[in-house]
Image: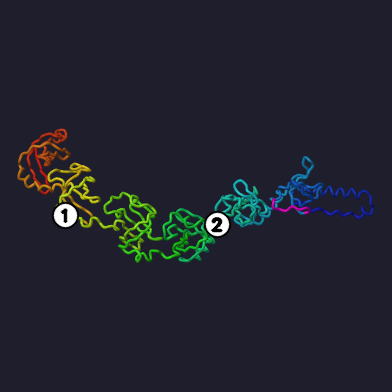
């Protein structure tokens, strides 16, 4: 700091004598005072002139100090005769001018004030003055750095909006050697938010109505600021009806009233509800939609297994793919309906507790299977076309949408059939006999071998045990060979009855079409099997 200027007192003897020593003493006084001002010190001065780019400051020296005007903050008033503290850069530059700095003086004085009165973790107030690389500069008596990530709870987004505004900050770091101070506003906001959340969690009760502001919207729900803590309004708790996205109901910034559904103080979580402000539409569903009643609804969703029908807001039923048609084969519900269609259906089942309603479209029409036993009595001969083949049988279409099954065991009395395609072809017209009808389960059993009587009693008589037979090999397996004894009558020579050496393979000795002789060693009437031996 600069020393105070001394008052010049005229010695009585000089004043009385009036000689030249007075002038000499005064000059010595002035030179001594000038010598007291040192470079690198802070001096108290007074503004004497304001120009466009500089300010002249009287510091009690032989000439005024020059101070760049840009060292004043743009919001800081500059007035003539105003007192000011400046840092003396040099008494005389190359142009003979006295150079001073307000910025350096402010920094030194501010640093002394901060270092004497504050420590890390203390709260200090300041004004954000400008943006720099990586953050903002804050005037707290000296310039301190506020990292962009510490400006707000949202980080570095839109930090320009904080310029020229005053806030409270936490002193994060004081670097005394470098005289740097780092601040954080976010840390203070976080502490305040945690305290507000704690207070709010203690105040809230389950079932309470609370107003809040929509803060953020996600696919799964909405975050609502309740004034100290955020609560989650899940998409399933927004409406009794079906919605695809929360933005269909609310927008960011909306003020909404919600119901407190749950409070988890341990994890600081609050569950909110919007639809709970009104009664559940399922309360009266049992009376409105009893089993058997016909309803109309709109198709709101289609899945591979069925279509969802909205009966009213918040009440939906499912038409399973099997309930679309009595006779038509449906691979996907979109073959029958489209989203937005208004359709008529029948309530098949109702579970209010699980909020499930089973619907059917085909039940709006008469079941064509009713009276099927009268139209196709057992033992009736009918003609139809083979519609589909499987390993276990062939489906024959008797009329549009009505199929019967010929099981492979009902195709031939004697021929061993492993796949229906060995006996019939898809699209082939065949004549069949109705064996049985199950109207309730929509099943018809058909047969082809029943056109003739069972030949096995006669076969047993014709081929007694020990009889020799000759036949053509029609199939070779790892357990033996099958030979055709007569048309559609086969017998098996098991590998143990082939009279082969252990080292010889069946396929190395026998070929399809070979004629072989064998003896009948087994007749199984129940299984319709003939056992043969070459031994």
- Tell me: residue 198, above or below residue 524: below
Left or right for 535, reference 59? left
Q: Nearer the viewer, residue 312 or 159?
A: 312
Write the residue at 15% across / 34% down.
511
Left or right for 431, reference 34? left
Q: Nearer the viewer, mark 1 or mark 2?
A: 1
First in residue order: circle 1 vs circle 2: 2
Q: Quadrant of residue 185?
A: bottom right
Give percent across and percent down for residue 363.
Answer: 29, 58
Element on which disc 1 rests: loop
Q: Residue furthest top?
A: 508
The image's mark for residue 190 is 2
Q: Nearer the viewer, residue 221 or 278?
A: 278
Element on which disc 2 rests: helix
Give percent across and percent down for residue 209.
Answer: 49, 65
Q: Which residue is mark 1?
A: 377
Q: In the image, which residues are magenta? A: 73-81
């Amino acid at each position: 700091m600069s020393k105070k200027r001394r008052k010049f007192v005229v010695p009585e003897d000089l004043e009385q004598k009036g000689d030249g020593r007075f002038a000499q003493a005064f000059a010595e006084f002035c030179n001594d005072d000038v010598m007291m001002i040192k470079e690198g010190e802070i001096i108290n001065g007074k503004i004497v002139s304001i120009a466009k780019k500089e300010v002249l400051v009287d510091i009690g020296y032989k000439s005024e100090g020059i101070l760049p005007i840009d060292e004043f903050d743009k919001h800081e008033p500059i007035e003539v005769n105003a007192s000011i503290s400046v840092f003396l850069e040099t008494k005389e530059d190359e142009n003979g001018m006295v150079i001073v700095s307000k910025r350096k003086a402010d920094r030194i004085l501010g640093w002394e004030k901060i270092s004497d009165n504050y420590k890390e973790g203390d709260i200090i107030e300041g004004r954000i003055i400008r943006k720099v690389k990586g953050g903002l500069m804050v005037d707290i008596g000296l310039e301190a750095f506020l990292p962009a990530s510490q400006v707000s709870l949202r980080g570095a987004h839109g930090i320009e909006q904080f310029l020229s505004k005053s806030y409270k900050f936490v002193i994060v770091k004081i670097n005394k050697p470098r005289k740097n101070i780092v601040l954080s506003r976010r840390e203070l906001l976080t502490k305040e938010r945690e305290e507000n959340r704690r207070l709010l969690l203690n105040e809230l009760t389950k079932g309470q109505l609370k107003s809040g502001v929509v803060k953020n919207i996600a696919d799964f729900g909405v975050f609502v600021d309740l004034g100290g803590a955020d609560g989650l309004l899940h998409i399933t708790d927004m409406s009794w009806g079906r919605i695809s996205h929360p933005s269909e109901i609310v927008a960011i910034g909306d003020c909404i009233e919600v119901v407190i559904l749950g409070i988890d103080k341990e994890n600081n979580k609050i569950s909110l509800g919007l639809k709970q402000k009104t009664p559940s539409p399922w309360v009266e569903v049992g009376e409105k939609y009893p089993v058997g009643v016909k309803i109309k609804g709109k198709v709101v969703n289609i899945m591979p297994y069925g279509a969802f029908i909205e009966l009213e807001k918040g009440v939906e039923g499912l038409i399973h793919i099997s309930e679309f048609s009595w006779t038509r084969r449906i691979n996907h519900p979109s073959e029958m309906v489209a989203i937005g269609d208004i359709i008529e259906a029948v309530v098949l089942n109702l579970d209010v507790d699980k909020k499930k309603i089973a619907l059917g479209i085909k039940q709006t029409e008469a079941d064509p299977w009713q009276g099927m036993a009268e139209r196709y009595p057992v033992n009736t001969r009918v003609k139809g076309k083979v519609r589909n083949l499987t390993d276990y049988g062939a489906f024959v279409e008797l009329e549009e949408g009505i199929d019967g099954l010929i099981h492979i065991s009902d195709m031939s009395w004697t021929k061993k059939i492993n796949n229906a395609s060995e006996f019939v072809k898809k699209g082939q017209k065949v004549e069949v006999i109705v064996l049985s009808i199950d109207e309730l389960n929509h099943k018809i059993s058909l047969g082809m071998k029943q056109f003739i009587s069972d030949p096995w009693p006669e076969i047993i008589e014709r081929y007694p045990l020990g009889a020799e037979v000759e036949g053509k090999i029609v199939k070779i397996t790892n357990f033996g060979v099958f030979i055709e004894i007569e048309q559609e009558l086969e017998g098996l020579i098991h590998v143990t009855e082939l009279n082969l050496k252990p080292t010889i393979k069946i396929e190395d000795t026998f070929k399809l079409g070979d004629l072989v002789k064998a003896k009948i060693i087994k007749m199984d009437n129940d299984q319709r099997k003939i056992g043969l031996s070459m031994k």
